[in-house]
Amino acid sequence: MDEKIMNITLKKTKMSPRSKRAKRAVNEVREQVVRHMKAKEDDIWIDHRLNEALWSRGISKPPLRIKVKAVKFEDGLVEVSLPEDSTVEE
């Protein structure tokens, strides 16, 4: 079992249209986890609390950066969630 805490800057979300920014933020988190945990995109599971944190200010104003905890299990599945001491920066 491999575990990492990552600070993800969501700067590509500002380039997407306002009506698609929160969805782009979720995809950007997924892309970063695939890159750093060496996993397949289908094997990423995003926790509902992390999803709610990304969507907390609505579809057009996701956070600029977020801290996540990624845990990779032996079967290749990666669970992405908020760490216990997490802060979402505006």
Image: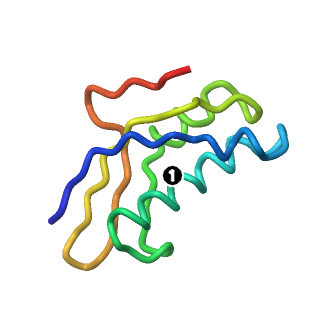
Whether 67 is drawn above or below 72: the answer is: above
Q: Nearer the viewer, residue 67 or 81?
A: 67
- How packed mark 1 is, by other alpha carbons closer than 10 Å (few <14, some 14-19, many 20 or more), is many
Residue at horizontal 57 percent and vertical 31 percent from the top: 64
Quadrant containing the C terminus is top right
Find residue 76 and report its horizontal and vertical position in percent: 30, 76
Left/right placement of residue 42 relative to residue 68 reads right
Left/right placement of residue 74 relative to residue 66 reads left
Find residue 52 and report its horizontal and vertical position in percent: 54, 36
Q: Residue furthest left?
A: 1
Write down the quadrant of residue 68 in the picture.
Answer: top left
Residue at horizontal 50 percent and vertical 33 percent from the top: 65
Whether 41 is drawn above or below 53: the answer is: below
Residue at horizontal 79 percent and vertical 46 percent from the top: 16
| Colour setup of the view | rainbow
Whether 33 is drawn above or below 63: the answer is: below
Q: Which residue is mark 1?
A: 29
So how many labels did they put on this image? 1
Find residue 86 and report its horizontal and vertical position in percent: 34, 28
Residue at horizontal 19 percent and vertical 76 percent from the top: 74
- Residue flagged by tag 1: what amino acid is it? Val
Quadrant containing the N terminus is bottom left
Find residue 60 and report its horizontal and vertical position in percent: 77, 32
Q: Residue furthest top?
A: 90
Write down the quadrant of residue 14 in the picture.
Answer: top right
Whether 7 is drawn above or below 84: the answer is: below
Circle 1: element type: helix
